[in-house]
Image (spheres, rainbow, N blue to C red):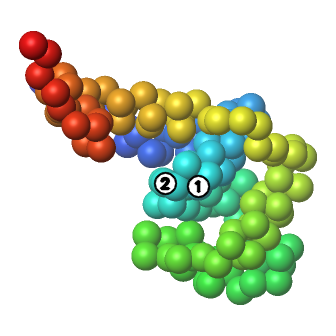
Amino acid sequence: MSLPLTRDYKETVLEDMRRNPGFRAAMLREGVDALLCGELNIGKEVLRDYVNTTMGFEALAKEIGIPSKSLMRMLGRAGNPQISNLLAIIGALQRHAGIELHVAGETKRAKLRKSRARVAQSAAAPAGFADPGRSFRRKA
């Protein structure tokens, strides 16, 4: 008896991006949202996958005037893109997708991060010691 073949999660996501324009737009938003929340590695990985499944690095390079190999390095694991290059990439991807992204208030990811931080802080510190700047006084 053989086990059924399973597909890699990343392959499944990339195939969904190829087939579903709404999913592609959502992935672009997620990549930018991750960058705005300080999750640089996640944001770069999502943008790299987005470029690979949509316009490709060669077309992106022509659009913004940066060599494709440089773009691949920027969005790679060790990449550290300058903000001007990152904004050029995001702008080109928005134009190619025919969408316009806007920053509006606090993102869901930022709210979730704050919520998790509060839970972690309250779980780690006993009552009365949650605020290290406040002195603890015993009630008589």
State which quarter of the image contains the C terminus: top left
For residue 8, side relative to residue 57 (left or right): left
As rendered, which of 102 and 123 lies closer to the eye? 123
| 88 left or right of 17 in image | right
How far across and down, in percent of the image, does residue 11 sit? 47, 45
Q: Secondary structure at mark 1?
A: helix
**Real-space Cα distance between discs 1 and 2?**
5 Å
Mark 1 packing: few (<14 Cα in 10 Å), some, or many (20+)?
some
Which residue, given by chain and number where applicable, does mark 2 sit on? Answer: 39
- Image quadrant where residue 9 sits: top left
Q: Amino acid at mark 2?
A: Glu
Q: Residue at x 52, y 55 (%)?
A: 38
Q: Position of residue 2 (x, y in %)?
A: 17, 29
Answer above or below: position of 100 versus 87: above
In contact (CB < 8 Å): disc 1 and disc 2: yes
Point 51% across, 60% down: residue: 40
Q: Which mark is residue 35?
A: 1
The quarter of the displayed image where residue 20 is located: top right
Report whether 54 appears left or right of 39: right
Residue for point 75% across, 60% down? 90
The reply to whether residue 24 is in sight is no
Residue 121 is at least partly visible in this image: yes
Q: How many marks?
A: 2
Q: Secondary structure at mark 2?
A: loop
Furthest toward the front, the residue is 140
Question: Residue most toward the top?
Answer: 140
Which of 117 and 6 lies nearest the eye of the viewer?
A: 117
Q: Quadrant of the N terminus?
A: top left
In the rendered image, residue 61, in percent from the top left (x then y), is placed at: 76, 78
Residue 101 location, x and y as percent?
Answer: 81, 45
Please state which amino acid type lies under the numbered disc 1: Leu
